[in-house]
Image (cartoon, rainbow, N blue to C red):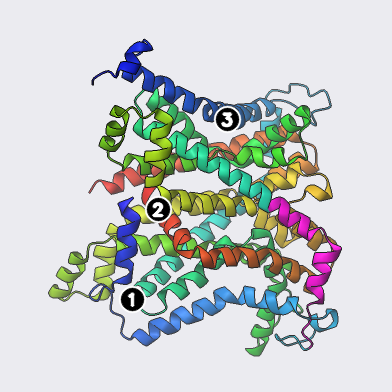
Amino acid sequence: MSVPRASSQTQSTPRPSSFRFTSRTWVYMALTVGSVVTAFPFVWMLLTSLKTYSDVFQPGILPANPTLENYAHVLEKTGYVRWFLNSVGVAAATTVSVLFFDSLVGYTLAKMKFPGKEIIFVIILSTVMIPTEMLVIPWYVSALKLGIADSYFAIALPGLISAFGVFLMRGFFEGIPDELFDAARMDGMGEFGLFTRIGLPLVKPALAALGIFTFLGNYNAYLWPLIIIQSANMRTLPVGIALFSGESGAQWQLIMAASSLAVIPVLLVFTVFQRQIIEGVVLTGVKG
Amino acid sequence: MTQSPRAKRSGLTLAGRQAVWAYVFLITPLLFFLLVRIYPAFESLRLSFLDYRSPLTVNPFIGLENFQEMTQDATLHRALLNTLLYAVIGVPAQLVLGLGVAMLLQGINKYKGIYRAIYFAPYITPIVASAWVWQWLLNKNFGPVNALLEQFGIPAQPFLGSPDQALVSAAALVIWQQLGFQIVLFLAGLEGIPRVYYEAASLDGVTTWTRFRYITLPLLNATVVFSVVIATNGFLQLFAQVANLNPTDQGGPLDSTLTVALYIYRMAFQSSKMGYAAAITVLLFAIILLFTVFQLRVLRRRVEY
């Protein structure tokens, strides 16, 4: 808990004696060059998405006749809106589930006393090492046998609880003094109440970070949705974009418009939650 | 520990009551981990001994034949070699660039947040979209990278179209994508180094390089190991990027960008050789296990001093 706060505070204070480069200007120049290179793919994507079909293959970076036609085409003539809603829906449901179960398990493993605690933690943690590739074949076979392939449930199921999140939340709950819980327990508060009313409010920053990363991870998920989705209506955004782009030949202005439509919402989320997202990375680093 | 009246009435001690609740909280997640993680992992191991074609056919037991086939499969060997090459190119590049940019960022006060946001943006961008943008970016005839090269009198390069350049081009996409994550990690690591070390060093008048070599690098060791673990695991499971960089010939040209994960997908879901694919996933798991054990050892040894 105190870890992220401390680091975000020290971030704003400069450290004069740590590293002094010969000239600060050079540092800014190097960073700017790096940023331009990093940002250029985005700029190029947006500019191409505004070009007409014939302008795409003309030299020059700026669109000669800027148009929003490509966006209209993608939104109206493809299943884009449906794909987007599918992705958001699956990601939202997964996030709610992960936040609830991961914090509950993390809390139980950190703050409750019961036989078998260590072995249960080791079992859960060991699943982190299993590569997804090893799991998708049995998942696919099982989904077919159960008749749930091509359903939202099948797309979401493998991600509904995350071992990494359990590990993260356990670390946070361990940082809370036991006395807080013991006092409330003596007052007669039930175990679930201890978790929801005492525990959860104290780990809000961790929940925010875990929630944002779970949402983004599932919004962007590709391998499993690609395997389990069969009908066009069920496609998530990455699967839809990959197939649409593959089918549209060299219509780069359309492909770039579709990519822009996938990227823009994420960048907006990032702009709003930048602090939590950056802290989230730091937290995983510190806890990991 | 004293017993509450309620606990006494129900016949359970406070500790016993707490244990019951703990199991109630854990039962659903534990079933999930058993059924959706651990059971499928063993199921893959079982499938690796079968000539498994589809859930609808008879899939005979063939012993170690899949594993024998793996030793003869030149395409698989290519995929393994490529995956190793990706890691050998990508991990050090991410590390050096990540630490470099983080140190530059640490040296400035103004616009730090903006720079960090720009470097981080690719990390959260959908991989599929990024891969298509890079395809267009690196296009031989119309891509801006070749247009820039032309300004310097360098002839147009095929990049993703050439077996010699495709892997490096794909690795560049992954590095671009992951760099922001590494920068943020390293920034946090650098902030964690106590200032007194640098102050003492500046009193002694040591050079920038000495400070880096004998203060920054050793104290940053935990971060370095963590970032190596994350980066290596990412490369060992590389899939979406390569699948979308050359969608008409996934892993091409001439399998030059093929990864183990992509080959598993190809075998299981395009060639209906699920048993064989499962055998390869067993190998992949073994590789990841080895790496993890090795890295944990390094981590433990280094943290001691």
Residue on which disc 1 sits: B107
The residue segment tinted magenta is A65-87
Q: Is mark 3 on a helix, strand or loop?
A: helix
Q: Which residue is drawn at 66% across and 25% down?
A: B46
Let me know if residue A190 appears in the view: yes
Q: Mark 3 lies on which chain?
A: B
> What's under tag 1, amino acid-wise?
Gly
Circle 3 residues within 10 Å: few <14, some 14–19, many ≥20: some
Magenta-span inclusion, residue A75 = yes
Question: Residue B280: image x %, image y %?
Answer: 65, 38
Q: Is mark 2 on a helix, strand or loop?
A: helix
Residue on which disc 3 sits: B32
Q: Is residue B213 left or right of residue B54?
A: left
Answer with mark 3 or mark 1, whichever residue precedes in sequence: 3
Q: In this view, does A3 lie above or below A68?
A: above
Residue on which disc 2 sits: A283
Residue A259: mark in rendering: none
Cα separation between marks 3 and 1: 47 Å
| Magenta stretch secondary structure, dominant | helix
Discs 2/1, front: 2
> What's under tag 3, amino acid-wise?
Phe
Question: Residue B175: image x %, image y %?
Answer: 54, 64
Q: In this view, does A160 lie to the left or right of A187?
A: right
Q: Is mark 1 on a helix, strand or loop?
A: loop
Cα separation between marks 2 and 1: 22 Å
Magenta-span inclusion, residue A30 = no
Q: Which chain carries label 1?
A: B
Q: Looking at the rendering, which quadrant does residue B198 occupy?
A: bottom left
